[in-house]
Image (tube, rainbow, N blue to C red):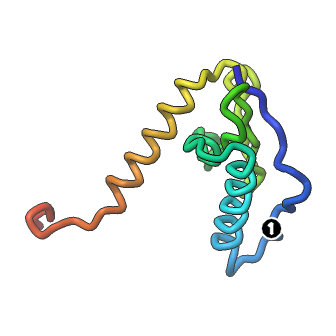
Amino acid sequence: MATVFRAPSSLPLPDFNPTTWREDEEKYLRALADLARAQSPGDELVGETLRFPRGDGHAVYMVWKRRPLQLVWIELGDAWRVEDALIRGLRLADVDAKVRQAKALRALFSRPREASEATPV
């Protein structure tokens, strides 16, 4: 069973800037992950983000603590949220699987394709 919290007020959300918003959000997420990992050194799951499709975007949460499972709601972009029942029902195994899937997808789509893998036209 997971509990959701807001991000610490010591780390204010970035103001929206139409030219630098992506970099500002990435910097904020790195700082928040560093803060989470400082509380649980060595725990690879802490500081990872979970994304749930919602509307025209995603509800984003960060793993804050493994036991008891605590997530931080990421209030960036449209600040989508998922239903409380979904969060309460999350198990550590679910979170671990979702993080592994996201990492596998990032690795799959970030590697350069070799000429032999190129799709013929």
- Inspect the image, locate mark 1, and give the three-letter code of the amino acid beneath it: Pro
What number of labels is visible?
Answer: 1
Query: At 80% across and 67% down in the image, what residue appears?
Result: 14
Q: Is residue 87 above or below residue 53?
A: above
Residue 40 visible from this viewpoint: yes
Considering every residue shown, the one lying at the far front of the view is 41
Picture residue at 34% right of the left edge, 57% below the top: 109
- The quarter holding residue 120 reads bottom left
The x and y percentages for residue 45 are 57, 40
**Which residue occupies 15% across, 65% down?**
118
Can you see residue 51? no
Q: Which image quarter: residue 95?
A: top right
Q: Secondary structure at mark 1?
A: loop
Which residue is label 1 attached to?
14
Position of residue 71 relative to residue 20, above or below, is: above
In the image, taking residue 43 as reference, residue 108 lies left or right, namely: left
Residue in view at x 36 percent, y 62 percent = 110
Q: Is residue 77 left or right of residue 42?
A: right
- At which x and y percent is residue 74? 74, 49
Q: Is the residue marked by circle 1 packed among few (<14), some (14-19), or many (20+) residues within 10 Å?
A: few
Name, please, the residue furthest toward the right: 9
Up-down relation of residue 69 to residue 105 (above or below): above
Q: In the rendered view of the protein, which quadrant contains the N terminus?
A: top right
In which quadrant of the rendered image does the C terminus lie? bottom left
Where residue 54 sits in the image (x, y, percent)? 63, 40
Residue 28, horizontal then vertical, whole percent? 72, 64
Instruction: Please give left or right for residue 57 compared with residue 10 in the image.
Output: left
